[in-house]
Amino acid sequence: MTRVEPSEQVSLPTENAARPAAGGGPWILAGRRLSHNRSAMAAATLLAIIVAVTLLAPLYAHHVAHTDPFGSNLAGRTIVDGKHVDVLQQSGGLGLGVTPIGPTWDVHHYFLGADSEGRDVAARILYGGQASLLIAVGAALGSMLIASVLALVAGFFGGLVDTLLSRLMDILWAFPVFLLAILITTVSLTQGLRFGPISISTSGVVLPIVVIALIFVPFQYRPIRGQVLTVRERDFVKAAIVQGASARWLLWEEILPNVVNTLIVFLPLVMGINLLVESGLSFLGIGVQPPAASWGSIIGDSQNLLYTRPWVAMGPGIMIVLTVVGLNVLGDGVRDAFDPNVRRLVPAA
């Protein structure tokens, strides 16, 4: 008999071959997926650096640059190359007008130069980052909380409640987001914003947080409601209903835990959008109010210096771009980590 030899050698997978992560719950598995996503980890590192640098604003302003980033310094002087020079220098041959000093690249003396009021641009960017990031995070958490409560109620109870809430969200969503934000903010700045006995001050960051949170509730309400409707029809929820579980228990113990991943995925993405909206409002002068500053208001104050001192606008602009890109890349990574349809091989722990 003739022995037939196989034309190709079949190699079987070895024990060391990559395989899906085994063991652990969905949160542990999502954490492993996220930790093995290099782009998401790079974005998280970038965001951590930005947050850390902005938190060090008081240390830089008072102990390194020795300057007040919120007070005018029209007659101030600083040291450049060992010489004392005016922060605001005479411009032109006729001596008409003044031009703030440009970047010295010395962290102790106006590293990125001064603005038209003689204030240290680098220190203002760090302080402005605190306000911008606080508004972005606060508005995202606020809108997420409101949208989650409304979506849980509408999706679980359905009927007339769902119809009324959904139509209300449709009405809000019909308005252009930025135009609605400008309208509410302008009215609030002129007449104040009150919710019953609660009055919101027009100074500080509370007003922008409230306005931005309110206008983005429909943006999160729709997908959360859809997720609630899906979970409500699952077998384990129907089984709990048959066993006599109360509506409160079903909402908190069965449905909410299964929509939390949707909320986590939305958080970094909404933060990036909030940062852009806040920057636009502050650029127009209806966001963060003086003497406080944000990245958007710093860019707005630098319009007359774009050609002579571009770093006054470029500095906060670069920070906005880096932060928004980092949040979007991180958001994509979080989405992939929680998406069961993403088949990413993760080494077993």
Image (cartoon, rainbow, N blue to C red):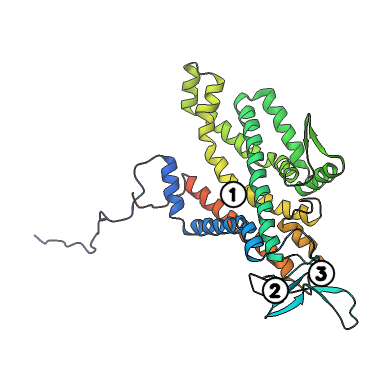
User: Residue pushed farthest top?
Assistant: 244
Query: Residue 337, image x and y in percent?
Result: 48, 48
> What residue do we see at 12% from left, 61% from top?
3
Pair 2/1: label in front: 2
Give the residue pinned by disc 1. 268
Task: Name the kind of residue labelled 1 in the image.
Answer: Pro
Secondary structure under badge 3?
A: loop
User: How crowded is the residue under tag 1: few (<14 C-alpha within 10 Å), some, or many (20+)?
Assistant: many
Secondary structure under badge 1?
A: helix
Secondary structure under badge 2?
A: loop
As measured in the structure, the alpha-carbon distance from the residue carrying label 3 to the one carrying label 1 is 43 Å
Q: Earlier in the sequence, mark 3 or mark 2?
A: 3
Q: Choose top left, top right, bottom left or bottom right for residue 195.
A: top right
Q: In which quarter of the image is the N terminus?
A: bottom left
Task: Name the kind of residue labelled 2 in the image.
Answer: Pro
User: How crowded is the residue under tag 3: few (<14 C-alpha within 10 Å), some, or many (20+)?
Assistant: few
- Residue toward you, 98 or 66: 66
- Visible in this render: residue 233? no
Task: Name the kind of residue labelled 3 in the image.
Answer: Ala
User: How crowded is the residue under tag 2: few (<14 C-alpha within 10 Å), some, or many (20+)?
Assistant: many
Q: Earlier in the sequence, mark 3 or mark 1?
A: 3
- Residue toward you, 28 or 198: 198
233 lies above or below 317: above
Give the residue pinned by disc 2. 103
User: Residue pushed farthest bottom?
Assistant: 93
> What residue do we see at 81% from left, 69% from top?
75
Pair 3/1: label in front: 3
Pair 3/2: label in front: 3
For residue 75, the mark is 3
As measured in the structure, the alpha-carbon distance from the residue carrying label 2 to the one carrying label 1 is 33 Å
Query: Residue 252, image x and y in percent?
Result: 54, 27
Q: Choose top left, top right, bottom left or bottom right for residue 309.
A: bottom right
